[in-house]
RNA sequence: UGGGGAUUGGUGUAACGGUAGCACAACUGACUCUGGAUCAGUUUGUCUAGGUUCGAAUCCUAGAUCCCCAGCCA
């Protein structure tokens, strides 16, 4: 065996699996998405667990589409889920399955249960059934059809399948216990009538199994050993086990863990769909969305997501993770891999008075100080430059290590420059800086050993490329977006400033060939990713993450 | 007020009756042609009350708080 070694500290699920493996049991897990939306970072946690355990313990992990509700499921979601899974770095090999492929078996097993008196066809409407279900504290009332003859149920069930009844007219129910304190055991529905076209089975069926009836049986058919799911299914486990026991088939073990929650974001497919359909975001792949395609468009490397999931761990504690954990994983990854470039988000013109009008010089700039093999690139320098507006302050405190009248700074990879003048418009806004450069400092060092405290990024005005930059903040203003007053919905907590578009950014000419998906570090600013909206004429960058911002604090401290 | 789960620094997690540890955040300092990175260091915690024990985050009792369940969704 050449399985990857599990971490020395095993979470409670890996502990269980390890114990089972020690007794010689195989490991087969599954990731069972319903194709009714795209995957989000909460799924990533489950994916890393399901696929991770299989890999670590020398087992396998199945990808199974839980496609039992044709009303909500679509082929594009099936395709999208596979695409996202591959992007994340997981491979299910030959093991792609669909619950819908088990419909025949499920139907036959349902007949088995009817024959053994464990299931019956019920004619109650949804409303009637609800009325008889009882409450959390009061037992339910048995259906009048509960004890109808087995032959009658068998016949009715077959006619349900043949399409003789309209939607909702009848259901097949398990006969368990209407007085059970666990509501899931109060004769749960196994089949409902749905005259709907299924993405895979087309119109072959008009009755569809419910989750409870389909899931455990699908697990069993595939020989799943450990069926991992989230906490809300804990109450379903007795039912999961009950069906399998009645059938006398292979019994996987269901184990539940806490789902992922992140502050100021939502990870509920239904609510994400609301954001998309309500036009609150650009779509499922909006860079603010916690979907895998959103994160991808934002510029988040898949490795960072995997690392984040590993850091979050697996427990049964209902936590709400600080998004900086994700951000940090992103920075760690990008710091290692992203090439550095210079881009100015809020440009302020600088004229180098003692630099010749028409001259252009070039410098070799390091592409990635963290990775010498990344090489260098050429950046042009000329008399007129752009620098970041916030890198200049007229009345600067001592700790402001940037440009101010009379102060000298280094332009990254280029020259030392000194501010000798400030131009302003009628209302007193700074419109241009006049500077001089020291030719002896070419390359960024002074032969006389003179030191400067600050280094600024810059772009040659004549060579600059125009770009649009999109700056992102969390989508919600509250740590828990679901925290609303009675009668309100989570949309009231949307952050109106979650996206800020800056149209007039200037970036260095080496970015001319950048393609959507390319990731860069704009030195001193942050990590950016080329958006699919970019055209050859106009680049568009999404800010993936800022650099750690101790600078701002230092300045504030200096001012205070 | 039925049933099922949970509770360890700011956040996420370890410790399986024997020194409460790790990561991130925060803060100090060093270094630096990114106020980034890196390096060194510091601060902060067992939900409460009893009990068992030489010794309790861990075992027992009682309580508090939070989450999930009354879809023919998953």
Image: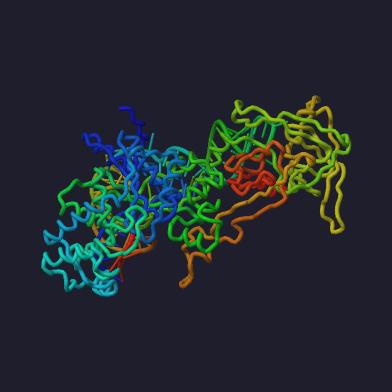
Q: Which residue lies at the image location 38% right of the left edge and 47% below the top edge?
A: A46
Nearest the camera: A201 or A147? A201
At 45% across and 44% down in the image, what residue appears?
Answer: A83
Give left or right: position of A97 versus A281: left
- Left or right, A328 with respect to A106, comes to right
Above or below residue A2? Residue A292 is: below
- Color style of the picture: rainbow
Residue A421: where, in percent of width, then height?
Answer: 87, 45
Which quadrant, please, contains the N terminus of chain A?
top left
Disc count in the image?
Answer: 0
Q: What residue is rendered at 48% in x and 51% in y? A: A291
Q: Would you say A199 lies left or right of A546 here?
A: left
Q: In this view, does A397 lie above or below A339?
A: below
x, y percent for residue A362:
77, 30
Give x and y (percent) for residue A462.
Answer: 80, 40
In the rendered structure, the answer to whether residue A111 lies left or right of residue A375 reads left
User: Which residue sits at x=31%, y=33%?
Assistant: A58
Is A240 drawn above or below residue A349 in the view shown? below
For the question of whether residue A182 can be seen, the reply is: no
Of residues A351 and A19, the one nearer the viewer is: A351
Asked if residue A136 can be seen in this view, the reply is yes
């Amino acid at each position: 065996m050449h399985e990857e070694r599990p971490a020395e500290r095993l979470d409670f699920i890996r502990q269980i699996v390890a114990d089972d493996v020690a007794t010689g049991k195989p490991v087969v897990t599954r990731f069972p998405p319903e194709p009714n939306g795209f995957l989000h970072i909460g799924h990533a946690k489950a994916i890393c667990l399901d696929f991770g355990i299989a890999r670590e313990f020398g087992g396998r992990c199945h990808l199974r589409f839980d496609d039992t509700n044709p009303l909500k499921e679509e082929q594009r979601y099936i395709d999208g889920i596979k695409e996202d899974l591959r992007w994340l770095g997981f491979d299910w090999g030959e093991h792609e399955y669909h619950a819908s492929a088990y419909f025949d078996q499920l139907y036959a097993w349902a007949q088995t249960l009817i024959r053994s008196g464990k299931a019956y066809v019920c004619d109650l409407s949804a409303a009637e059934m609800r009325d008889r279900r009882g409450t959390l504290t009061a037992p339910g009332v048995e259906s009048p059809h509960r004890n109808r003859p087995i032959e009658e149920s068998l016949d009715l069930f077959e006619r349900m399948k043949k399409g003789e009844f309209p939607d909702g007219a009848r259901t097949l129910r398990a006969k368990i216990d209407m007085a059970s304190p666990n509501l899931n055991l109060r004769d749960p529905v196994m089949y409902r009538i749905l005259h709907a076209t299924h993405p895979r089975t087309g119109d072959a069926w008009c009755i569809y199994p419910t989750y409870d009836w389909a899931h455990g049986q699908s697990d069993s058919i595939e020989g799943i050993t450990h069926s991992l799911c989230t906490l809300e299914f804990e109450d379903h486990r007795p039912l999961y086990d009950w069906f399998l026991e009645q059938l006398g088939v292979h019994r996987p073990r269901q184990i539940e863990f806490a789902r992922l929650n992140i502050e100021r974001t939502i990870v509920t497919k239904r609510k994400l769909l609301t954001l998309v359909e309500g036009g609150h975001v650009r779509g499922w792949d909006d860079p603010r969305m916690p979907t895998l395609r959103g994160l991808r468009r934002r510029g988040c490397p898949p490795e960072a997501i995997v690392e984040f999931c590993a850091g979050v761990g697996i427990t049964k504690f209902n936590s709400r993770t600080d998004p900086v954990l994700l951000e940090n994983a992103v920075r760690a990854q990008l710091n290692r891999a992203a090439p550095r470039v210079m881009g100015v988000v809020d440009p302020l013109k600088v004229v180098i008075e003692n630099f010749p009008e028409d001259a252009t010089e070039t410098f070799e700039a390091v592409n990635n100080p963290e990775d010498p093999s990344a090489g260098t690139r050429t950046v042009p320098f000329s008399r007129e430059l752009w620098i970041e507006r916030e890198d200049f302050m007229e009345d600067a405190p001592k700790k402001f290590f940037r440009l101010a009248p009379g102060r000298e700074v280094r332009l990254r990879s280029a020259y030392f420059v000194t501010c000798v003048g400030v131009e302003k418009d009628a209302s007193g806004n700074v419109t241009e800086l006049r500077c001089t450069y020291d030719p002896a400092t070419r390359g960024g060092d002074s032969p006389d050993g003179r030191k400067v405290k600050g280094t600024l990024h810059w772009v040659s005005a004549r060579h600059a490329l125009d770009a649009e930059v999109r700056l992102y903040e969390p989508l919600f203003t509250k740590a828990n977006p679901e925290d609303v007053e009675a009668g309100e919905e989570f949309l009231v907590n949307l952050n109106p400033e979650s996206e800020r578009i800056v149209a007039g950014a200037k970036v260095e000419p080496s970015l001319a060939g950048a393609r959507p998906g390319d990731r860069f570090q704009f030195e001193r600013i942050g990590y950016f990713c080329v958006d699919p909206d970019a055209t050859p004429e106009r680049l568009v960058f999404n800010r993936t993450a800022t650099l750690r911002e101790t600078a701002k604090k230092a300045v504030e401290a200096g001012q205070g």
